[in-house]
Image: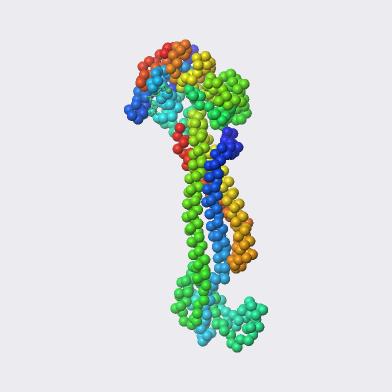
């Protein structure tokens, strides 16, 4: 394997530097799109995970005139609904207390209240957000409920957004990866064309197909690898910049859940290395296939 | 003492057709024993190179069977073809050296592909280069050599792994008479050491002077198979 050392491979890539550059750029382009989409998705996931526990509960306000027994019966009925994990009963007094604790510095405002405006409440914890709609529907059939509070729209919108971004990202990435594979394929074809005579000589002296093939695969893989590293680097820069921008200037609630640069860089690096080298190896495998039948 | 006869090459009713109704080889039956030196002669287009291609399993024959030692070529999976080619050395009219490698590296490559140890390579390559008289050219590239020198490199490469068979397609075709004789002396020497040699040529002087077995092809047919023949 001496002939096709890494050294030889790099030399060959340098000889065809225009095409090598084109290949690397196309890998970088497709991995950049993938990387940006991935960081958005990862953040949306982290954000929705983070806020989920705040929104994955349903508040059931109980009518004022219910007796203690009726309240207990209502509680049992709620507990029996499919998808309900647990329920907590919060009296109107507790609700007021909680509010006072949460807004300590404004608690003097509450002191002047003539009556407690809060209803008695059942707080339902869900097994999963996906049960929310059906639970809300079934609650409507129960007697003694004043109102059902659920931040359904927000949660749903986050779920929708996640899958939307993911789908668009997947299509775009596949498309760009296809282009990158095609360009690498052509780069390797150039190298192979220049070495066609060499390949046929190698076959005459009894070199096996794999002995001939692997240096070309190495070439493609190196192109993909370089592309992966560059695109990860660019993502790193873009992300650290956005991270600073978001955490220092924009909507704080979102920024609190924003993944840090290291976490993102690690995920993206792993993904890029796999896909980049994959594109590279695949591109060269495809291009060398027909030249081996000497 | 009887010399033990062992089959090196056997052609069994071999026919090779190309598209457009070309019959390159027409029902060939040939036995070649180990240790023989055989000339394949005939005019341009007679089928000499096709004969060589069949031996290398570059293409399959249209009909018939070819055996090399005990191997039936039609049974040989394409993945095993490299193994077949390692058993034989091949020499062509146009030398076919790797232009980006030195003389030394060209010869060493043949050893490297069969997984020879570097130590073994360092030992054998200088040896064979001295046999073909190119010790002082080892570091040069093919385009720095004369035609005769290039052909000697290609013979060294063909012989480095001690093949039992050397196949040469017009090895002297691009060389002047004096240089051609150097090449023939080399081939004769390897043949004396036991290597079977099959050489396609239309060099009449060489064939006449060597007095070896001659197989003549005309339009793909064997019209003559003569021991110690002339052209
Ligand atoms: N790949 C091919 N496709 C079609 N016809 C071919 C092919 N190879 C050889 N032929 C034909 O087969 C015949 C024999 O060719 P071959 O090359 O064996 O002749 P040759 O004896 O080696 O001639 P020369 O002395 O000129 O090298 C010729 O008519 C040639 O045109
Ligand atoms: Mg010929």
- Residue at (54%, 79%) from the top-left corner? A121
- x%, y% of residue B184? 51, 16
| Residue drawn at x 51%, y 62% as measured from the top left | A162
* Rendering colour mode: rainbow
Q: Which of A82 and B171 is in front in this view?
A: B171
Quarter of the image with the C terminus of chain A is top left
Q: Which residue lies furthest to the front in this view?
A: A18
Q: Is residue B222 left or right of residue A269?
A: left
Judge whether residue B212 can be spotted in this image. Answer: no
Image coords of residue A204 (percent x, y): 49, 29
Pick out the residue farthest to the right.
A105
State ligand 1's quadrant.
top left
Let me know if residue A64 appears in the view.
Answer: yes
Q: Is residue A194 above or below residue B29?
A: below
Instruction: Using residue A108 as the reference point, say whether residue A189 is left or right of it.
Output: left
In the picture, residue B5 is in which quadrant? top left
Closer to us: A234 or B33: A234
Q: Residue furthest bottom?
A: A114
> Which residue appears at 57% of the width and 49% of the height?
A228
Question: Quadrant location of the N terminus of chain A?
Answer: top right
Location of residue B23 in the rendering, given as x and y in whole percent from the top left corner: 35, 25
How many numbered discs, if any? Answer: 0
User: Could you tell me residue A122's position as x and y percent?
Assistant: 54, 78
Pick whichever, B129 or A225, lies toward us.
Answer: A225
Q: Which residue is drawn at 60% across and 83% down?
A: A93
């Amino acid at each position: 394997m001496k002939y096709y050392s890494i050294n030889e491979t790099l030399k060959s890539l340098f000889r065809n530097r225009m095409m090598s550059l084109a290949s690397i750029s196309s890998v970088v382009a497709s991995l950049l799109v993938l990387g940006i989409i991935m960081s958005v998705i990862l953040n949306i996931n982290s954000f929705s995970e983070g806020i989920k526990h705040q929104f994955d509960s349903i508040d059931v306000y109980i009518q004022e005139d219910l007796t203690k027994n009726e309240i207990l019966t209502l509680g049992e009925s709620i507990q029996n609904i499919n998808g309900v994990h647990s329920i907590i009963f919060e009296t109107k007094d507790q609700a007021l207390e909680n509010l006072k604790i949460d807004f300590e510095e404004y608690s003097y405002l509450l002191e002047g209240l003539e009556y407690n405006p809060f209803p008695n409440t059942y707080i339902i914890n869900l097994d999963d957000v996906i049960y929310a709609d059906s639970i809300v529907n079934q609650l409507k059939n129960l007697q003694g409920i004043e109102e059902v509070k659920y931040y359904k729209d927000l949660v749903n919108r986050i779920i929708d957004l996640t899958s939307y971004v993911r789908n668009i990202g997947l299509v775009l990435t596949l498309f760009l990866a296809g282009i990158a594979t095609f360009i690498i394929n052509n780069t390797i074809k150039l190298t192979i064309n220049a070495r066609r005579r060499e390949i046929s000589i190698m076959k005459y002296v009894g070199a096996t197909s794999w002995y001939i093939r692997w240096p070309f695969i190495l070439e493609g893989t190196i192109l993909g690898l370089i592309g992966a590293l560059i695109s990860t680097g660019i993502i790193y820069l873009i992300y650290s910049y956005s991270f600073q921008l978001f955490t220092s200037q924009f909507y704080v609630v979102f920024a609190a859940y924003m993944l840090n640069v290291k976490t993102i860089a690690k995920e993206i690096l792993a993904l890029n290395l796999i896909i980049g080298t994959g594109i590279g190896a695949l591109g060269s495998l495809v291009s060398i296939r027909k030249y081996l039948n000497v | 003492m009887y010399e033990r006869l062992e089959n090196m090459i056997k052609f069994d009713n071999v026919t090779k057709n190309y598209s457009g109704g070309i019959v390159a080889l027409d029902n060939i039956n040939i036995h070649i024993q180990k240790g023989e030196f055989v000339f394949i002669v005939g005019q341009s287009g007679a089928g000499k190179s096709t004969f060589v291609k069949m031996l290398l399993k570059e293409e399959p024959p249209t009909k018939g069977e070819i055996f090399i030692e005990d191997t039936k070529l039609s049974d040989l999976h394409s993945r095993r073809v490299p193994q077949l080619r390692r058993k034989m050395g091949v020499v062509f009219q146009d030398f076919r050296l790797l232009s980006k490698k030195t003389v030394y590296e060209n010869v060493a490559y043949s050893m490297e592909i069969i997984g020879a140890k570097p130590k073994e390579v360092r030992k054998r390559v200088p040896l064979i280069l001295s046999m073909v008289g190119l010790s002082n050219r080892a570091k040069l590239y093919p385009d720095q050599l004369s035609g005769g020198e290039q052909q000697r490199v290609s013979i060294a490469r063909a012989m480095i792994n001690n093949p039992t068979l050397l196949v040469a397609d017009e090895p002297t075709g691009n060389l002047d008479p004096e240089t051609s004789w150097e090449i023939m002396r080399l081939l004769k020497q390897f043949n004396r050491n036991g290597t079977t040699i099959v050489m396609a040529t239309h060099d009449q002087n060489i064939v006449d002077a060597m007095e070896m077995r001659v197989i003549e092809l005309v339009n793909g047919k064997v019209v003559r198979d003569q021991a110690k023949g002339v052209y």
